[in-house]
Amino acid sequence: MSSALQTLRSVFGYNEFRGHQAAVIEHLIGGGDALVLMPTGGGKSLCYQIPALLRRGTGIVISPLIALMQDQVDALLQLGVKAAFLNSSLDGQAAWQVEQQLLRGKLDLLYVAPERLMTPRFLELLGRAELALFAIDEAHCVSQWGHDFRAEYLQLSVLHERFPDVPRIALTATADAPTRREIAERLGLTEARQFASSFDRPNIRYRIVQKRSPRQQMLNFLETEHRGDAGIVYCLSRKRVEETAAWLKEQGWDALPYHAGMDSDTRQRNQQRFLREEGVVIVATVAFGMGIDKPNVRFVAHLDLPKSMEGYYQETGRAGRDGLPSDAWLAYGLGDVVTLRQLLDNGEANEQRKRLERRKLDALLGFCETTVCRRQSLLNYFGETYSAPCGNCDNCLEPVQTWDGTVAAQMALSCVYRTGQRFGVGHLTDVLLGKTTDQVRRFGHGSLSTFGIGKEFSQTQWSSIFRQLVAAGMLEVDMEGYGGLRLTPDSRPLLRGEQKIALRKDPESGAKQPKGQKTPSRSAATGSGAPASSKEGFQIDSPEAEALWQALKAKRLELAREQGVPPYVIFHDSTLLAMTAQRPRELEQLAALPGVGKQKLERYGVAFLGVIEAH
Ligand code: ADP
Ligand code: ZN
């Protein structure tokens, strides 16, 4: 057996490598440079951790996520790996000790913040240590186009000049090709071997609903599928973050806000509670999440539209790192489009940048309205082909009905035209429905040819029609005025009767759970929100199994609290689920479960066998 595989089994307790892991590890052990592109949850860390263990010297891991270094190191210490970190949170004495350990060759892995790494003093220190490799995590931080840009990352090319013989590995979960190229160029890795995986996240179920009463819709979704689960709710503004968190709390959820406007202590505390406790829901702006490596985030819900497909993919990607079934849920309506366009048009970016961002928003709208498989359309956007419908998204599980909306669309477009291309959906709908409101009277719209011609549709249906015409690029939102709608050149063929349009039928009530999407065991009898099944297909399907699962989780939390570490560094959910399924009685049987390496078996084996036995 190769020594890499042996290490995987004995230290990490896993049986097989996944995807490109084995190839990357072999390449690195042989001294080669690598650029690794893997989705979140793909297993990037092992790609450098195992070579660092097997090569002589210390593996230096560069990561911008200072707040998470402690947890990463704690997780390694639990495995019996000699790890430490160096960042601004350590006092001088503690930092000095870590440096001494490095110089004496006592460390397998050392996590360092980039700003510390690049100081002349530290580079000089590295020169005196034996180095196994450099791992540059979150490598997309070198890209000036991305939202995670870190200026210090630009200097990392120095590493190659100063330490030409130490292999380097850069890792990212960012999917788009321009960013990949930028990473390779800026980090001096154009010669490095590239390992690109599929960016599919098969365990994430994508779902998009039309906004009606978004909070209530979300609550229904959470209550039916995620009682007791940890998750993230994204909102666009700080105010909405605060309001939504407070509201969820009133509804009995353990919800906490997180945004850049909060004082840093509270923010830090909320993040810690999310990481260290079970079942906490964090309500946040996009400020939250980079590198959140909590593996059992069971859902990511968007109450507002993200700004782009890239943003959507990255944010939803924080769900289900552990590979267990998870949900990406988004509520979307025309109001979102108006708000985002407004933000964009009033923003400070130059014209070229704004055009780019408008295009990105349009792509996202297309994705929201699509009637085909969401996964196919998502991966397609990132340049990947996914050959058959996935069977694990809303459009696959409940195919969207479409209808010939040509005549309705013509009515809507002419109504826009006849009222002077400056009114919003509310007024346009009043005119179509023939309502004599104050505004209709004031503008004399009661005498228009389109007045009252649309009575066969309801108000909700008209709002769906207008939304889809905006998403299809036939109408645009006028940002100079008050968000009125204007015709675009693309609307002409339809108005002239040269083109037909198929519109999606929005479900009557957005809160309803479509058939086939229920996953009852995700929130089993006691409503605890256990994951539906592991990859091995295990389901918690009886109150009895549920009780054992809860008891195992309680033991884990107790052990975690004693040591001040997050529960998942003791065992992942998948390991506890496997215990629930297989009920090992002997240490040997326990050792065969995924995620049970030597060290953990020694430290916790007896405690968990005890729980199973007592059960
Ligand atoms: P990434 O950094 O790519 O998001 P991680 O390195 O955190 O992913 O790994 C994601 C999860 O998958 C972790 O829970 C990890 O323990 C698990 N994992 C990684 N490689 C394997 C493997 N070969 N077999 C089983 N589980 C694995
Ligand atoms: Zn699908």
Image (spheres, helix red, strand yellow):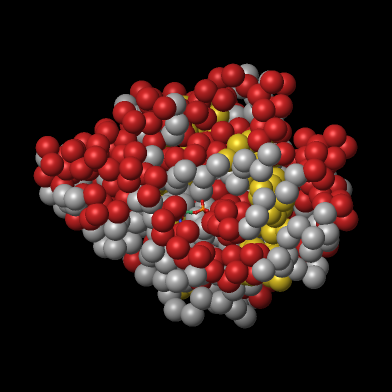
Is residue 524 visible in the rendered image? The answer is yes
- Residue at the spot 83% in from the left edge and 41% down from the top edge: 123
Q: Quadrant of the C terminus?
A: top left
- Image position, residue 572 (x, y; %): 37, 46
- Residue at the spot 37% in from the left edge and 25% down from the top edge: 562
Question: In this image, 536 relative to 371: left or right?
Answer: left
Above or below for 221 versus 116: below
- Viewer-nearest residue: 192 or 305: 192
Q: In which quarter of the view is residue 250 placed?
A: top left
- Viewer-nearest residue: 187 or 517: 187
Q: In which quarter of the view is residue 548 placed?
A: top left
Above or below for 535 versus 293: below
Question: In this image, 27 relative to 429: left or right?
Answer: right
Q: In which quarter of the image is the N terminus?
A: bottom left
Above or below for 556 versus 196: above
Is residue 458 visible in the rendered image? The answer is no
- Image position, residue 527 (x, y; %): 22, 39
Quick one: which residue is furthest to the front in this view?
104
- Residue at the spot 41% in from the left edge and 27% down from the top edge: 563
- Image position, residue 172 (x, y; %): 65, 56
- Viewer-nearest residue: 404 or 383: 383
- Image position, residue 85 (x, y; %): 63, 36
- Residue at the spot 85% in from the left edge and 40% down from the top edge: 124
Question: In this image, 304 relative to 576: left or right?
Answer: right
